Image (tube, rainbow, N blue to C red):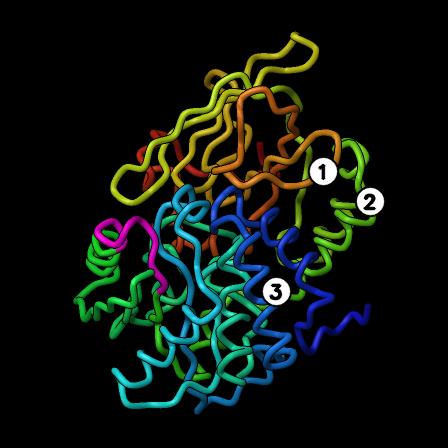
Amino acid sequence: MSDILTHIDLEHLDDLAMGSVFLATGGGGDPYVPKLITAEAIKAHGRVALLSPKDIRDEMFIVTVGSVGAPTVSLELLPSVQEAAETLDAYEKFIGRKIDAVASFEIGGGNSVIPICAAAAKGIPVVDGDGMGRALPEAQMMSYPIGGVKPTPALAYDYAGNRATFDTDTTETYERHIRAFSMAAGGMVTAAEHAMTGRQVKDTIIPGTISFSVKLGALLRQKRGQAPSLEAPLQQLFKSSIYGECRLIYSGKVIDKTTRVIGGYDIGEATIEDFSGTEENLLINIKNEYLLARQDDRVRASVPDLITIVDYETGTPINGERLRYGQRVAVFATGCPDFYRSEKALKVVAPRCFGFDIDFVPLEEL
């Protein structure tokens, strides 16, 4: 595989899906069905050009597209091959302008491949990057609005073809409105939002995350095995990336996991018991994503840094909706991109923004 990825084809989808689930910290939706429909779109329309942010022309018109809702629902309310492209078609009619390229909300599970499915059907490129460098549960947490881009005008499309349009004063208001629509539409919708110029994309996107996910997925596939054997190769890969630190922080068995769909999010927690029985249990707090890992009062990792749960025996990352009682797992913590450690970003993504009474401490300082 070349170091420079210029397109996404069938051969990249499995690695992209696996790598993006690792980065998604439990959220972003299960990629299995979105990966299948993206494969069908590529078979029908051809491979998708991957556009490096540095090669974007300032005057280009770029729109983000993806799913909004509770990830648990994505296991039952399945997307169709046409849904993402039809959402973009409806958006073009709504605003009266052709879209030159698409970008991802988040490099997360299903939401990493849905823009590629849409781009294939529309015959346009997808930008190599996303709005989070991971997955996060709310719209105002994307790098685009943090960088000053408005999410609206936006359009959402449900499984029955019903559409809703949005024009709000703030991103927080938009988040409430689209979340309410997704709940009314069964719990999951496809949305086109954050229309941007090429200049705005270059200024706000977290770059290179699609191509990095392919590399990460390839490593997890090639080094498949027990989680401790993955730590060194993962550290080497992440060290030269925008993420930096990656470490194995805990291994054990899931002894409790409870989530409920509340307000359009999967909210709950999971408890992992150490294999040796000598350590305190690890508690993971969940709001679509794994947000906080702690042993009693000791924080092991917290949002906006990444917390990833993998199958202990294979190293396969596990989405939050597929985490189950009795699974043998390992927990990795990874640093977030520098963008999310800025004062401006921490105002919307620090642990206190999720109701945790702690300040953010970078992983490498814990």
Name the residue: 66% across, 62% down: 13
Residue 53: x %, y % from top left: 56, 77
Q: Which residues are magenta?
A: 182-190
Number of other residues with Cα within 10 Å of mark 2, as a class: few under 14, some 14 to 19, many 20 or more = some
Quick check: 21 left or right of 268? Answer: right
Seen from this angle, which residue lies furthest top? 278
Secondary structure of the residue carrying tag 1 is loop
Question: Residue 337 in magenta?
Answer: no
Question: Which quarter of the rendered picture does the N terminus lie within?
Answer: bottom right
Name the residue: 59% across, 85% down: 55
Q: Nearer the viewer, residue 256 or 89?
A: 89
Name the residue: 66% across, 29% down: 330
Label at residue 223: 2
Q: CA distance from mark 1 to mark 2?
A: 9 Å
Residue 310 seen from this side: yes
Question: Residue 185 in magenta?
Answer: yes
Tag 3 residue = 210
Residue 155: x %, y % from top left: 28, 71
Q: Which residue type carries mark 3?
A: Ile
1 and 2 marks in contact (CB < 8 Å)? yes
Tag 1 residue = 315
Residue 42: x %, y % from top left: 62, 74
Label at residue 177: none
